[in-house]
Every structure is written in C-alpha cells, then in structure tokens.
Amino acid sequence: MAETVKLITPIDGTVYAERPIASDKAIDAAVESAKHAQGQWAQTSIAERGRFCLAALEALLAMNDEIVPEIAWQMGRPVRYGGEKGGVEERTRYMVKIAEQALAPILENDRPGFRRYIKHVPLGVVMVIAPWNYPYLTAVNTIIPALMAGNSVILKHAAQTLLVGERFAQAFEKAGLPKGVFQNIVLGHAQTEKLLGSGRIDHVNFTGSVGGGRAIEKAAAGTFMTLGLELGGKDPAYVLPDVNLDHAVANLVDGAFFNSGQCCCGIERIYVHEKVYDRFVDGFVDLTKQYVVGNPLEEATTMGPMAQTRFAELIREQKAEALRKGAKAHVNMNVANDKAGSPYLAPEVLTNVDHQMSVMREESFGPIVGIMKVRNDEEAVALMNDSPYGLTASLWTTDTDHAALIGDQIETGTVFMNRCDYIDPALVWTGVKDTGKGAAMSAIGYGNLTRPKSYHLREEI
C-alpha cells in the first residue's frame, strides 16, 4: 500500500484529507514532463504567458467560496477574513504587468559594427516548496514570476495545506496551460531531498524554518542550483514619541495577532519610547482583549486555533519561561480549549521582558508579543538588531525623514513606516542573516528566476 500524507485539521483533530506520496516513477515522470514542456514554454511570448497566468488567476478567484472554508479546515484561519484572494490577485497582476519590461534585454549600443546585449533567460525547472501559513500567497510569489520568466514549475505544498496545490493545478488546467508547465506533487521529506540532490532541478524556492532552509542547502549541495530561501523571523516595531497612537495600536495589534500570529513578517517584539509607553501598552492590551478565539468556521471568531498543537505548546513554553523570569502577562484571557495538548490559544501581551527571554529572541510564530520601554533611538536600534533574523522592521512616527535615517541602521530586508505585515509586489521581498537569501517580487525578483546570457555579435568583418 502506498505511503500517504495525512492532513490533521486543527479544528477538531480529525483527518481532513489524505493523499498518497508520489512514487519514484511518478517523480521521474513529473521532472521529465517539466523539462520537456519548459523548452516550448520558453519560446512562448511573454504576452501569451501572461494570458495563461491571468486566466489561471480568474479560475482561482472563482473557487474562493470553496477555498475559504478549506483554509479554515486546513490551518485554522477564520472564514470571516475571506481567504487570500486580494493579495493573490494584486501580486499576480503586478508581476504579469511588469514582466515585459523586467525581462527585456539590456542593450549596449556604443560600438558601431557590433550588436551587444544581455538577455534574461529562464533557469529551467523551478521547484516551489510552499508553507502552510499563507498557503496561496507564499506559493504565488514564485509560481507566477517563474512561469512569466519562461520556467516550468513543480509545486510541493506543505502537508498541512495539501489541498492548496490541487487548487493551483485545477486553476492552471482550466486556463489551458500546456501540459507539464505546472505540476503539483505530493512528496515526503526524503523524496524532496533526493530530488533536490539529483541535479534535475534548476532552482528551488523554499519558505519555512531555518532548519528547513539548512536541509534544503545541504540537499542541493554540489548541484549548483540557485536558491531562494525565506526562513525565520522575529520582526520588531519601534514606537516613537511623535506617533499617532491610535493608528499604531490598531495596526500593531493586527500585525501581531492576525492569523494567530502565524505570519512570516508578523510583529513579535515591540519597543516603545518611554514618553508614550504607558498609554501604548494600555491601548494595546485593551484592543487585544477584544479577540474572539474559537472555531474558525464561525463568523464571530476573530482568532482560530494554531495550525498544529506543537506550535501552541511552544508559545505556552515561551510564556511560562518569561513569567518565571519576571515578565508580566496582561491579557490572561479565559478561552475554551486553551489547555495543554490543544491548538487553541489565547493571545498574550507581556511586559517587563528582556532579551534574556526566548520570547524576545527566538521565533514565536504565534499569538504572543513582548513590549519593552526604550529611552531613545539608539537603544531601540540596538535592540532591534539584537536578533539572528532580519525580514522586516516597522517604525511608528510622523517624521518620514527620521524614519528613513533610522531604517538605514536596521539590519532588515524591509523597513516599514506606519504599517507592517504586508508585501508590496513593487518592492523586493528579501531578508538578511538567518532569515535567508534570495529575493521575490518586483523586477529584482525576476532576476532570481532567470540567468543572464550575453550576446556579442560582430556585424562588420
């Protein structure tokens, strides 16, 4: 009997979906199909590729009423938020729109008698290993630009969100995409590592843990494939004394707790200038207490369970350690099923925290946030940089020039001002330190999914 992957829903702990893992023969067939299809796909015009991608987008959007409850069943996000269609559409349409310009040859015309230019040519077969936390958004970040650049794509989605890969496959099939250009495949860890080490994949994009990123690098060692890795994060916010306090509170509470805190660029630690600290904490705690934790299929629920029980247990451990070391918990919400062994977890706000506590140093990826008082910019910047991660950092102030100057000092991939937890497809999405390497979105993202090829043609002899 074939080995299977089981999707355990966090709603009630039952098996929501089960799929067989691909056989070695099926994997070989998928790779051969991708390689064969890619050659013809690369000869297809960018405009025509765009028509296929936009048709697939429309097909995906048409499924949204079915997709929204599927997301809730798979990873626990409440149905009231309507899925991920807004971001998927924004990113897809933008990356299709800029493709002609981003992929246009670079011309060098300063030498008469020569035709000299650099083309952006596709890498070949691109593998996307997508995570469960934003299962459509994280996947579309690479799938669409990879296809627009002329690559074929093999998607291996997280076991927690098995059905997402199938939805993408259905959308591309409805769009009439040529066979083999996009494929969804179910793999185990050992099979994934074997495939990456085979030399038959030309680029892999992985979003996940630091440990997972290291395993990807190890598996790909010696193949010389290119890598895009978005790994861990511990994204900070700094609230300055000239802040619009109500705006900052509302947006930072959402940035910390949306999706039960399971966001790559969610706010995990907040540094607040002493002049506004007390008022900020009071407002932040009051708003956090308004969350309704429960069954994500119910419209009243604003925070569902975490995707897996083990993720909730990590948050419970971080909170307990912080309290032992002197932190103060402000919310202490009474939530049904919030107990050891359950993925249901109330949001928590901690003060009297420091960087000796894991909640301020290690990735939480859950509904908990620590708030520290700081005296000045220098102290805030030092604390923001005191981390092995660097994906985003947000600054809350009315002085744009000041924010830009502070941003220059922060070790991060993106600097936000008066917003957080958002990907602008016109700006490159990247990280530093243990957050990984590579880039997605924007014209720079296309550079990661192509290779430069020079043409030096002498016309006069």
Image (cartoon, rainbow, N blue to C red):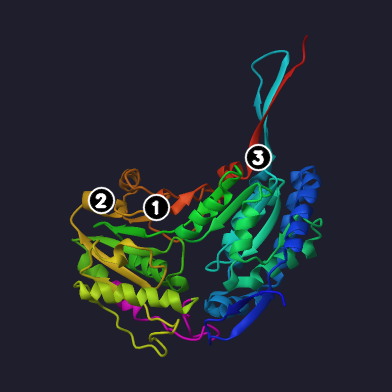
- Comparing 306 with 334, the one in front is 306
Q: Which residues are magenta?
A: 282-306
Picture coordinates of residue 420 (x, y %)? 42, 60
Q: Amino acid at mark 2?
A: Ala
Q: Amino acid at mark 3?
A: Gln
Q: Which residue is mark 2?
A: 382
Q: Is residue 38 magenta?
A: no
Q: Residue furthest top?
A: 461
Q: Is residue 382 left or right of residue 187?
A: left
Q: Pick the residue in front: 121 or 214.
A: 214
The label nearer to you, 1 versus 3, is 1
Q: Earlier in the sequence, mark 2 or mark 3?
A: 3
Q: Which residue is mark 3?
A: 101
Q: Position of residue 189 (x, y in %)?
A: 59, 64
> In the image, what residue type sits under mark 1?
Gly
Residue 129 in the image, given as x and y percentages of width and height: 60, 59
Q: Give me the disc on residue 222.
A: none
Residue found at x 23% / y 67%: 353
Q: Main secondary structure of the magenta part?
A: loop
Q: Nearer the viewer, residue 265 or 187?
A: 187
Give the CA distance from mark 1 to mark 3: 30 Å
Pick whichever, 398 or 353, lies toward us. 353
| Quadrant (top left/top right/bottom left/bottom right) for the N terminus | bottom right
Q: Which SS class for mark 2?
A: helix
Residue indicated by mark 1: 390
**Magenta stretch: residue 304 in it?**
yes
Give SS at disc 1: loop
